[in-house]
Image (cartoon, rainbow, N blue to C red):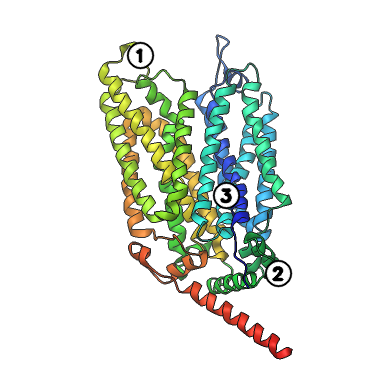
Amino acid sequence: MTAVPTNTRAIGLAFFVAFGGFLFGYDIGVISGLLVMPDFVQRFGQENPDGSFTLSSSRQSIITSLLSAGTFVGALGQAFTADRFGRRPTILIWAAIFTIGVAIQTATVRSIAQITIGRFIAGLGVGAMSAIVPLYNGETAPKALRGTLLVLYQVQIITGIFLSYVFDLGTHALGGAASWRIPVGLQLVWGFILLSGIFFLPESPRHLLGIGKREEACVVISQLNSVPLDDPLVDELVDELQYAINAENEGGKATWLECFSPVNGLWKRVVNGMMLQFLQQLNGQNFYYYYGDTFFQSAGTTLSPYVIQVILGAVSVVGTIPALWAIERVGRRRLLLIGAAWQAVCALIAGLSGHFTLAPPNTPIGDLTSRNKQGGDVLIAFAVLHVFGFSMFWGPTPWVYLGESFPLRIRPKAIALGSATNWVWNFLLSFFAPKIAADIGPLILLIFFGMLVVAFIYVFFFIPETKGLTLEEVDEMYRSGVKPWSSTSWTPTLGQRAHEKAVAHEVRQEREKDDSM
C-alpha cells in the first residue's frame, strides 16, 4: 500500500531557502538610509571649507553601484558552482561570501575603499542568491505548490527591504557609528542563518538524478514527501522524474551558447526569462523607492524620507500576501497581464498629475497652493497603488517564471542570465533615473507607462501559462510549439507517459519477485 505524501517538509525547506531573498532585499534597502546618516557622511564624505561634510554624488554612486557590479558577477558565477558542486553547496558557498562582505563593511572605520570592496563582495553573494533560490525551490517544490513557494522569494525580498527601512528609521538618530553599523552588522546574523542550512538542507533530487545518484535522490524524495524510503511511492516518483529528465536531456550537456539554441525552443525560454526581468525593472516601482521622497515633498508632505520609505515598504509587504494565493489560482500569464494594465494606469495618472499640478522642487510648504496639494495627493495615492500592484503582480511572477521554465541541463545557466539581466537594469535605472527626473520631473513616469504597455503586449504574444505543470511538462510544452495565447487550455502528455512507464516498471518487478519465489 502506498503512503499518502505530505508537503510539510518541502514547504519548510522552501521557506528557509527563500531567506536568500531576504538578504537580497535587506542589502538593497539598507544603503539608502545610510547615505544621509550624519556619522556615515562624516566618515566617508568630503570635508567642506566650513568644516561640514558632504557625501558627493560620485561617492554615493561608487558606494551603491559596487553592489550592483557584485550582484551581476555573482548571478553568473552561481551557474558554475550549481553545476559543479550542486545546489546545496552553492547556497552555502555564496552565503559565506556574503557574510565575509558584510564583515568587511561593518569593520570599516573611515575607508571608502574598504566599504565599497565589502559592498562588492556582499553583492557577489546577493547576486548568486537571486539565482540559486528560484533554481533550488523550483526543483524541490511540488508542482501544485511551486508557484506559491517561489512567491515566498519575493515575499522575503520585500520583507528584507521593509525591515531595512525600519532599522534605518530606528537607528538614524543614534550618535556615532552605531547609527549605521547596527543596520549593516545585522546582516551578519542573516548570513549565519543561511549558513546553518548545512545541517539539514538536502540536495535537489533533480540534480542528484542528473548526475546519476539515484539512491541519494530516493532519500531526498522520501524526506520531501514525508514517507518511508521503502514506500512504493518513492520509486514511482523517482522513475517518473528519471524518465522525464532523460527525455529533456537528450541533447546532452549545454554550453552558454546552447542556451540560445533553437532546439526545443531553448532560446525562446531564455529570452523570455531575460525579458521579464528587464520589464520588471522598467515597471517604475524602484523609482519610488529610491527617489520618491523628492516628489512627495513637492506634494506638500512633511514626512521624513525614512518614514516615507517605511510606508512604501509596508505597502509592498501587504501586496505580496494575495500573490501567494493568486499565483496558483489565477496563473502566471494572467497576473502579468493584469499587473501591466494596473501599473500602467497608475503611472499615467501619477505622471500627468505630477507634471501639471506639482510645485517646483524645494518650494517652501507655505507657498504651496491648494492645487499643488491636491495634485500631490493624487500622485501619492497612485504611487502607493503602483507599488502595491507591483508587489502583487510583477514583483513575484517573473521570479516564479524564471524558476520553472528551463530543462535541467541549462537551468543554472538560464536562471543566471535572467537574474543578471535584472541586476544590469537595476544598476542602469538607479544611475540614470535621477538625471532624467532632474530634466523632466514627474514625466519620467510616462516612460514607465510606455514600458508597461510594451510589457502587456510582450506577455500576450510570448509568455505561455505554466501553472499546474511539472518542470518537465513545461519543457514538453515548449517542445510542442504551443502558442502562448492557447497555453492555458493545453494538456501535457509527458507526465502520463512517465507515470505509465513507472507503473509498468513496478509491475515487472513484482512479477520477477513472484517468479523467483
Label 3, label 1: how many angstroms apart (C-alpha)? 45 Å
Specify the quadrant of the image occupied by residue 66: top right
Secondary structure at badge 2 equals helix
Q: Residues within 10 Å of mark 3 (few under 14, many from 20)?
A: many
Label 1, label 2: how many angstroms apart (C-alpha)? 70 Å
- Is residue 443 visible in this depiction of the protein? yes
Give coordinates of residue 1: x percent, y percent.
Answer: 63, 73
Badge 1 or badge 2: first in the primary sequence: 2
Q: Which residue is drawn at 64% across and 35% down?
A: 187
Give coordinates of residue 9: x percent, y percent.
Answer: 63, 55
Q: In which quarter of the image is the C terminus?
A: bottom right
Q: What residue type is labelled 1?
A: Ile
Which mark is on residue 365?
1
**Left or right: residue 473 compared with residue 187:** left
Badge 3 or badge 1: first in the primary sequence: 3
Instruction: Mark 1 vs mark 2: give the one in front.
Output: 2
Q: In this view, does 55 lie above or below 97?
A: above
Q: Which amino acid does label 2 sit on?
A: Glu
Name the residue tied to disc 3.
75
Instruction: Mark 3 vs mark 1: give the one in front.
Output: 1
**Left or right: residue 89 compared with residue 345:** right
Secondary structure at badge 3 equals helix
Which mark is on residue 215?
2
Which of the pair 30/59 is nearer the observer?
30
**Left or right: residue 508 compared with residue 462:** right
Q: Residue at x 41, y 42 (%)?
A: 390
Give coordinates of residue 65: x percent, y percent.
Answer: 54, 36
